[in-house]
Amino acid sequence: LWTVLVTTGMRISEALGLAWSDVGDEITVRHALQRVEGEWQLRPPKTAKGRRSIPLTPLAKEALRAQREQQSEDAGATLLEGLVFTTESGYPIHATNLLPKLRADLEAAGLPKVGLHDLRHSTATILLEAGVPLPVVSRVLGHSTVRITMDIYVGRIPELQREAAEKMQEAVGLSR
C-alpha cells in the first residue's frame, strides 16, 4: 500500500477503494472507499478530475503483484469483492487503522515519522523536484485545478525556488 500511495499520489480513500479490475499497466481511479452511517461504500473520487488513470512504475507493479499473492494466501470473507487492499480476513481497511502500521514500518526502515497524507505530499514533491511539469503533477494527483497543486506544493519546495533563481541568473547572464 505504501509503495502504491507514494508512486501514484492517490488519496488514501482512492487506494483503499481500488479494485483489481482497475489495475493493469496503469491504475484507473474510479472509486474512493468511505464509511457512511456504518456501511462501507464505494463512492466517486473527491473531484471530477479525481477520475483518472495513473501509469504504474515497475516498483508499483511489483508491489501490486506481491499484494495479489499475499491476498490469495489470506483466508476469509470478502465484503466488497475485488478490492486490492483488504484486511487478512478480506474486509475493507479502515483508514484510521493505517497510521500505527505506517509509523511502525517507517521506524523499522529508519525513516522519520509522517502521516498518511504526507505520502501524497511526497509524491508531489518528488515529481516537482524531478522537473515534471506542474499540470502533469496536478493531473496525477487528481486535483480539480492546477492552481490547487500550485498553492499547496510549489511554495513548500525551497529547492524549486533556488532553481528558479539560478535559472534567472543564467537567463540574464550577469555574474558577480
Image (cartoon, grey):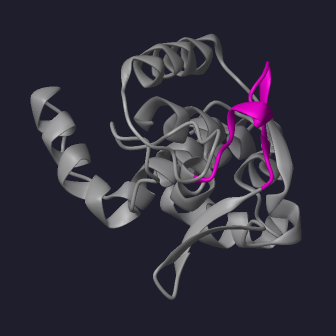
Residue 26 is covered by the magenta coloring: yes
Up/down of 62 relative to 150, above or below = above
Residue at image location 47% in from the left, 13% down from the top: 69
Residue at image location 64% in from the left, 42% down from the top: 128
Q: Which residue lies furthest to the bottom in this view?
A: 37
Q: Can you say which quadrant of the picture contains the C terminus?
A: top right
Residue toward you, 129 or 109: 109
Instruction: Specify whether 35 is left or right of 55.
Output: left
Residue 138 is covered by the magenta coloring: no
Instruction: Specify whether 119 is left or right of 42.
Output: left
Residue at image location 78% in from the left, 36% down from the top: 22
Up/down of 24 relative to 46, above or below = above
Instruction: Specify whether 155 is left or right of 23.
Output: left
Residue 15 image point, x, y percent:
58, 48
Up/down of 173 relative to 34, above or below = above
Magenta segment: 17-30
Residue toward you, 165 or 122: 122
Instruction: Give the quarter of the image for residue 127.
Output: top right
Q: How many labels does the image show?
A: 0
Residue 133 image point, x, y percent:
81, 42
Q: Can you say which quadrant of the picture contains the N terminus?
A: top left
Instruction: Give the quarter of the image for residue 28.
Output: top right
